[in-house]
Amino acid sequence: MQVWKFGGTSVGKPERMHSIRTLITADKGRKIVVLSALSGTTNALLSMGESAKMGNDAELAQKIVDLRTHYQVFIQELYSTPESLAKGQNIVESEFSFIQSVTSLRPFTLKQEKELVAQGELLSTQLFQAYLEEQGESSVLLPALDFMLIDADQEPVLSFTEEKLGEMLRQHTNKQLVITQGFICRNPRGEVDNLKRGGSDYTASLIGGAIRAEEIQIWTDIDGMHNNDPRVVKKTFPIRELAFEEAAELAYFGAKILHPSTITPAKLRGVPVRLKNTMEPAAFGTLIADNTSDRDIKAIAAKDGITAIYIHSTRMLNAYGFLRRVFEIFEKYKTPVDMITTSEVSVSVTIDNPEHLDEITAELAQFADLEEHDRDQTIICIVGNFSADKEGIALKVLEAMKAIPIRMISYGPSEHNISLLVHAKHKAEALNALNERLFHYEDAMKGIFTAP
Ligand code: ADP
Ligand code: ASP
Ligand code: MG
């Protein structure tokens, strides 16, 4: 069995839903189809939540009318029979009456916001399932809220999905297509929750891992993982193959095509992940699996919103136990550290979640001197196969960066990653300079159209 996930733009128009039906039925294997919300819907729902929080009722009412109208127009083109259209209208009416009632609650809390934002995936999957039924396809809609669970640390509980989804699938062995929602889940209190923005990719991978799928396919609006961020750099190209570790680094360090945690469950269970383009299904895309080709530098990604913390030991040279004390504080506040560099008496670290920065700073200051933190930093992550016997890779990277101030450099902890910290204002310049120096665009484009 395979798991195929379609993102927001892939379901964002009625004709796209029609194409998805063609895609998922042209391939004859039984599959689980994970859908995101229609593009724009999650943002629109969150924006309603903001109006509700501010108590701005007129603005809220307008936002609800606008989104409801969007869906009313959408279903007119989605269905071709009056019976299905009536079904679609019922779905839209019942979802929007929920949206109306949940946004009218005061105070409007985080719990309500999570219920509200879940409606995007609940809408897209019900509308698509009704369309498949209209077209006579053998399909069933299974609610993700019955088998996706996060624990108190907001970590997905894979064993729960394995057991619950396993049972549910055994009850529907006669169905070729199993449709479900990406992104949404329950938390330990039984409330509706989610896997954070872009989380449908993660859902697909968790399901793929849980059922030990043959393959997980992530269908989106681009022909695979590119060698650099196509939103910032012009001459980028798709990479045909990546190792799990390489893809995980790229996703974690900002390649938006994948939710940062997507690769973890797939890697754990050894399930290959294929990235495909819904608009151009014949394109090869990217295959992420255990193996890796020997090419040195494969891709670059950038992660924004980073804070750098500079810590100096007050006990000076040879102070053992210092690093342990530093990291215990980050652990206490459940704040992951992304980059670390050390000298004899100093350590610099970066974090992407400044929620507890004040408490962390206060505790560090009890045994260390701190320089002022640098906010608004970007980690540039260069990914590839950099085993120690490869020469000249760091040189090429630093040559490309010669005109750009670098705040931190990390090289060596894995054979797959060189990370540089720069101020966010230098990000575009750095990505473009590295692209020019590290890749040969014309050669790469030739390779794309010839056999690998
Ligand atoms: P979906 O809605 O299908 O989940 P996303 O918008 O989340 O799609 O992800 C796809 C987008 O990711 C692309 O349109 C592209 O702009 C962006 N992106 C950022 N970095 C990369 C990269 N290295 N390779 C491919 N796409 C990338
Ligand atoms: N709809 C959610 C979001 O926009 C999840 C996803 O698209 O993956 O973040
Ligand atoms: Mg996405």
Image (tube, rainbow, N blue to C red):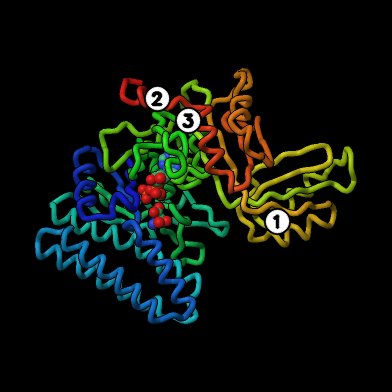
Circle 2 or circle 3, nearest the eye = 2
Residue designated by label 1 = 332
Quote the CA–CA distance across marks 1 and 3: 33 Å
Q: Nearer the viewer, residue 433 or 359?
A: 433
**Residue drawn at 58 percent across, 44 percent down:** 426
Q: Quadrant of the N terminus?
A: top left
Mark 3 close to ligand 1, CB under 8 Å: no
Compared across the picture, whether 167 is left or right of 227 comes to left
Please say whether residue 97 is visible from this viewpoint: yes
Which residue is pictured at 35% across the width and 41% down the height?
Answer: 222
Give the residue at the far front of this rendering: 403
Quarter of image, ligand 1: top left
Residue behind mark 2: 442
Give how far across and how far down residue 45 sits, in percent.
39, 67
Q: Position of residue 208 (x, y in %)?
A: 39, 43
On-image quarter of the C terminus: top left
| Disc nearer the start of the sequence (1/3) | 3
What is the three-letter code of the residue carrying label 2?
Answer: Glu
In front: label 1 or label 3 = 3
Residue found at x 61% / y 20%: 392
Q: What's the CA distance linking mark 2 and mark 1?
A: 49 Å
Residue 10, image x, y percentages: 29, 49
Residue 184 falls in image quadrant: bottom left
Q: Between disc 2 and disc 3, whose residue precedes?
A: 3
Residue under label 3: 243
Q: Is residue 287 above or below residue 152?
A: above
Q: Residue 181 lies in what quarter of the image?
A: bottom left
Please tell me how crowded label 3 is: few (under 14), some (14-19), or many (20+) other residues with Cα within 10 Å.
Answer: some
**SS for tag 1?**
helix
Secondary structure beneath dot 3 equals strand
Q: Nearer the viewer, residue 103 or 403?
A: 403
